[in-house]
Image: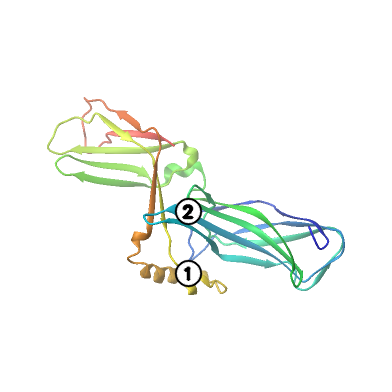
Amino acid sequence: MKDGFKSITIEPFNGYLDFQGPINPQKPTNNLVLKGDIHLHLSKAIKVKRAAIKFVGSSRVCHKNTLDVVDISTPILPKLKTQLFSSTTILGPGLVILPWEMEIPNIYPCSVMIKRASISYKIELSISMGLHRTVTAEYPIVIKRYLIPCLEVAPLVPTKLYTKTISTKFHYEIDAPRIVCTAQQTIPIAIKLLTIGTHKPVLSVRTQMIQVELYRCNTLPKTDADMTKFKTQLLGQKNTSSTASRKGESSKYAKYTKRTSPAIIHTLDETQPISSNQPLLQLSIIN
């Protein structure tokens, strides 16, 4: 360290933020408070002009499209900042503990770290003693987001019905949950099938989990990038205007799919009658 600082440590009381439900930037609710202590070990008295703690997020996308390799890093807005001192302060030698607290609005996506994309957050401390004399420290923060509060309510989540008719062959319906908790270990699915113009029996049903990743890169207008006067109630209006200007940019999408291995084959009884009212197959896919 330098300028009389032996060490600087940021110690949040909890390095994880657990948000509930989807993001609603227009009316953010259930905000969380992030708090902790800063431990400064000083070898001498220090005159501090400014000291601030920031909540900073960053994202990165790296993939290959039809033309070239896309590798873009960008900050996640808005950045949050809290001043630790209202005026110039002198800190004595030895151990100095500075408490800090910051409210984090429920508008940030969860932390992600996969092959082609990442979203990360951190607490950043900046202490200024004068012109060109600044020391910094940081601590990573993980944001988690849960669409359901606990495993017990997972069966209560409404399901979604997927239907399709293949001409002259059959009509099928798949009743699957909209949200799945990873702690369930299995995914309950009901399949209905009605054959058209044929009496051939259904011998088997093949199921396979597919992970879909969709990426799109756009240039952010300067008016949207200026978040110094960020107001959440205006965010919905900005998103509406930005979406309208993005028409015709669908060619900039990059899509990746990943299939689980192996696929599961469910063998059916040939003598089982096909009914349009009862599920042909009720199964649980192992997650």
Q: Which residue is mark 2?
A: 62
> Which quadrant holds residue 249?
bottom left
Q: Secondary structure at mark 2?
A: strand
Q: Secondary structure at mark 1?
A: helix
**Residue 208 falls left or right of residue 77:** left
Q: Can residue 31 be seen in this snapshot?
A: no
Which label sits on residue 9? none
Outermost left residue: 197
Does residue 244 lie above or below 281 as drawn?
Answer: below
Q: Position of residue 5 (x, y in %)?
A: 81, 59
Q: Can residue 254 be seen in this snapshot?
A: yes
Q: Which residue is mark 1?
A: 235
Q: Position of residue 252 (x, y in %)?
A: 37, 60
Q: Position of residue 247 (x, y in %)?
A: 34, 67
**Residue in the picture at 43% in, 61% down:** 217
**Residue in the picture at 47% in, 44% down:** 153
**Residue in the picture at 23% in, 27% down:** 272
**Residue 197 falls left or right of residue 77:** left
Does residue 252 lie above or below 186 as drawn?
Answer: below
Does residue 114 lie above or below 237 as drawn?
Answer: above
Mark nearer the N terminus (2 vs 1): 2
For the C terminus, the quadrant is top left
Residue type beneath disc 2? Cys
